[in-house]
Image: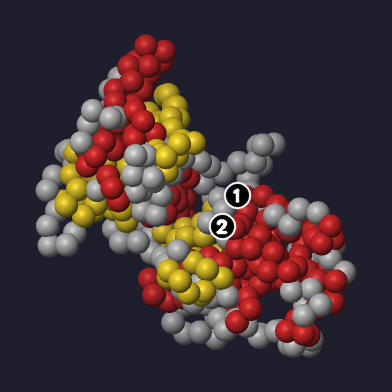
């Protein structure tokens, strides 16, 4: 059986993994992303990146592709020398941005990818060339790539068509993917509900204006920023008013009595305090995040006709009780909805290493789905399956 190469390109690292036809990892290694910043500035005053420093003899629009080709060559030589692994005949690219193929090239644009490395393709379209679009290669946005891996699993194990599944990113960021889908699914920038003006946040999608984008409240960054805003409002009359969507007074008392006032208010601590109802303000922030996520997930399900949405990344992995609360809120939102048949299911993703399998799964032959599904099943460190059976002690 032939081997497959997966390349997962993010803002800080470029991960390479070589797998055989059954999905067994033969060799893997990570390198600095071409977009990873150094501590210096360029001559033009912009933050210097790895390829600014290492690819000075290559024209700017060719630097990313040249750098990745160099890493791939080094990686495959190491894989052959240390693991005896043969070169791949298929390549999958999971990329941190909008992705397409043009003029025989795999192209992307993304928030972590400086456009000074972009090539001009005419008609006002420009993008960063990642690699040649050779036979046997495919590329997708990282959310859609992870969704493809998960969709293959659901197809093999549950008989659900991949196109009826979705993958929601619940980590530092907040995003979404659909298997084998070419366009970005920017669920993180859906304005999910009315928010008081003081809780609107700056967002990368809309320069110079604060928004109620889902990502501002549902992501790890959003949890932390929401906490910062609420804590900064202590004692202000705005917190006394009732909060949209919640009965009773505003979060004023929750802020004044919160343990978050005297320590780290990062997403990890917020979620730890929210579980079990240990802190009212943390519960308020988690509840808002769950509500926002449920609204966004239901919107995606209605748009794409989804049966099941798997939630992955750090928050979903470490807090499956939060995913269960999202599912409960989605159930309430869709009660009696005739447009979602069968009923929408939201659960922690059944995948292990979705980022690695995402790139690889883009080029897995359909006849190998079952074999790959057995490798993609998620496991905890103690070897048990991740489930949504953990009880939610906080309401």
Measured in 3D between alpha carbons, the distance from the residue under mark 2 to the one under mark 1, in whole angstroms, is 7 Å
Quadrant including the N terminus = top left
Q: Secondary structure at mark 1?
A: helix
**338 on left or right of 384:** left
Q: Which mark is residue 10?
A: none
Q: Is residue 160 visible?
A: no
Quadrant including the C terminus = bottom right
Q: Is residue 60 visible?
A: yes
Q: Is residue 375 above or below residue 312?
A: above
Q: Secondary structure at mark 2?
A: strand
**Residue 202: horizontal and vertical position, in percent?**
52, 68
Task: Report the residue at 33% width, 44% height from top.
Answer: 44
**Residue 59: horizontal and vertical position, in percent?**
20, 36
Q: Is residue 37 above or below residue 248?
A: above
Q: Which residue is mark 2?
A: 170
- The residue closer to the viewer here, 139 or 349, is 139
Task: Report the residue at 32% width, 56% height from top.
Answer: 98
**Residue 104: horizontal and vertical position, in percent?**
13, 44
| Dot 1 alpha-carbon crowd within 10 angstroms: few under 14, some 14 to 19, many 20 or more | some
- The residue closer to the viewer here, 66 or 336, is 66
Task: Give residue 275's quadrant in the image.
Answer: bottom right
Mark 2 and mark 1 in contact? Answer it, CB < 8 Å: yes
First of labels 2, 1 by sequence position: 2
**254 on left or right of 17:** right
Q: Which residue is mark 1?
A: 314
List the single residue furthest toward the right: 257
Q: Is residue 65 above or below residue 162?
A: above
Task: Report the residue at 60% width, 82% height from top.
Answer: 197
| Dot 2 alpha-carbon crowd within 10 angstroms: few under 14, some 14 to 19, many 20 or more | many
**Residue 41: horizontal and vertical position, in percent?**
42, 40
Task: Report the residue at 29% width, 38% height from top.
Answer: 64
Q: Is residue 353 above or below residue 316?
A: above
């Amino acid at each position: 059986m032939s081997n497959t190469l997966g390349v997962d390109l993010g803002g800080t690292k470029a991960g390479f993994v070589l797998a055989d036809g059954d999905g067994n990892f033969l060799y893997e290694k990570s390198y600095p992303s071409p977009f990873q910043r150094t501590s210096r500035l360029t001559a033009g005053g912009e933050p210097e990146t790895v390829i600014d420093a290492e690819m000075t003899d290559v024209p700017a629009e060719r630097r990313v592709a040249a750098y990745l080709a160099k890493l791939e060559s080094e990686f495959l030589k190491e894989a052959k020398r240390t693991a005896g692994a043969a070169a791949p005949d298929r390549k999958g690219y999971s990329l941190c941005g909008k992705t397409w193929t043009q003029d025989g090239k795999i192209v992307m644009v993304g928030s972590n990818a400086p456009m000074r490395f972009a090539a001009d393709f005419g008609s006002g379209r420009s993008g960063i060339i990642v690699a040649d679009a050779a036979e046997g290669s495919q590329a997708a946005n990282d959310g859609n790539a992870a969704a493809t891996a998960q969709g293959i699993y659901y197809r093999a194990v549950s008989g659900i068509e991949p196109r009826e599944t979705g993958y929601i990113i619940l980590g530092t960021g907040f995003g979404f993917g659909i298997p084998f889908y070419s366009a970005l699914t920017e669920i993180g920038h859906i304005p999910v509900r009315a928010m008081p003006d003081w809780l609107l946040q700056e967002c990368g999608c809309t320069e110079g204006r604060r928004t109620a984008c889902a990502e501002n409240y549902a992501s790890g960054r959003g949890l932390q920023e929401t906490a910062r805003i609420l804590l900064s409002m202590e004692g202000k009359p705005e917190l006394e008013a009732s909060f949209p969507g919640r009965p009773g007074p505003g979060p004023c008392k929750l802020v004044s009595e919160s343990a978050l006032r005297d320590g780290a208010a990062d997403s990890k601590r917020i979620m730890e305090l929210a579980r079990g109802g240990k802190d009212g303000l943390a519960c308020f922030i988690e509840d808002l995040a769950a509500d926002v996520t449920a609204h966004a997930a239901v919107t995606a399900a209605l748009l794409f006709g989804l049966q099941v949405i798997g939630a992955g990344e750090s928050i979903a992995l470490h807090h499956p009780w939060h995913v269960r609360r999202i599912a409960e809120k989605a159930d309430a939102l869709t009660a009696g909805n005739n447009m979602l048949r069968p009923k929408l299911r939201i659960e922690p993703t059944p995948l292990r290493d979705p980022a690695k399998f995402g790139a690889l799964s883009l080029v897995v032959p359909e006849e190998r789905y079952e074999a790959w599904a057995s490798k993609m099943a998620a496991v905890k460190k103690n070897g048990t399956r991740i489930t949504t059976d953990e009880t939610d002690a906080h309401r």
